[in-house]
Amino acid sequence: MIGKGSKAYSILLLKCPRCHQGDFLEAHPYKLKNFNKVKERCPQCHLKYSIEPSFYYGSMYVSYGVGIAVAVAVYVLTLILGLKMGPLPLFIAIVATLVIAMPYIAAISKSIWANIFFKFDGAIARKEKQDHDSRT
């Protein structure tokens, strides 16, 4: 379900949407120096990640949806755990979770946005794997 070739693999592990091998971001999402900076090209298949200038502005809409999903998940988790929280403590718990998860939410949103426009190509992934295996 989350193996190579699935969108979930590329999105959750922040890998190239086409080959699922190269890294999508310059650095880890929580490394704030390069906060969610997308690489120009995939280091493996050389896919250009940005179709046009400001391509990733659309990921802001995805980020909103992911943020809402995280907020709902926190609320449902408090219900499942049987925590009796009033509106203010629940609001604080949701906001704290969103603030802590913000770098990863932004990275996932960019990855989702890229996966909408770029399709997995198994032939490229197999060729890159063969090239890598022949070099080692």
Image: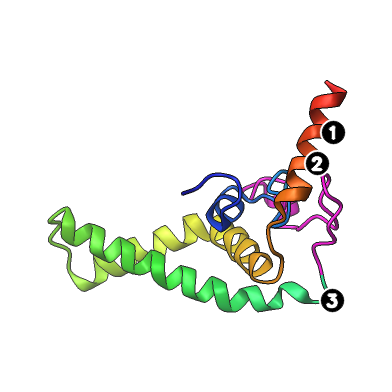
Q: Residue 103 placed where, x, y %?
A: 58, 57
Foreground residue among 16 and 99: 16
Q: Residue furthest front?
A: 123
Dominant SS type (magenta) = loop
Foreground residue among 42 and 104: 42
* Residue 78 can be seen in this image: yes
Q: Residue 97 placed where, x, y %?
A: 40, 58
Q: Residue 112 placed where, x, y %?
A: 60, 65
Q: CA gap, disc 3 to disc 2?
A: 27 Å
**Residue type at tag 1:** Asp
Instruction: Report the residue marked by disc 3.
Output: 52
Instruction: Report the residue marked by disc 1.
Output: 131
Location of the C terminus (image quadrant): top right
* In the rendered image, the vertical position of residue 36 relative to residue 129, given as above or below: below
Q: Is residue 35 left or right of residue 1?
A: right
Is residue 42 located in the magenta-colored stretch of the structure?
Answer: yes
Q: Is residue 89 left or right of residue 109?
A: left
Instruction: Report the residue marked by disc 2.
Output: 127
- Kindly indicate the quadrant of the structure image that contains residue 105: bottom right
Q: CA gap, disc 2 to disc 1?
A: 6 Å
Residue under the point 87% across and 24% down: 135
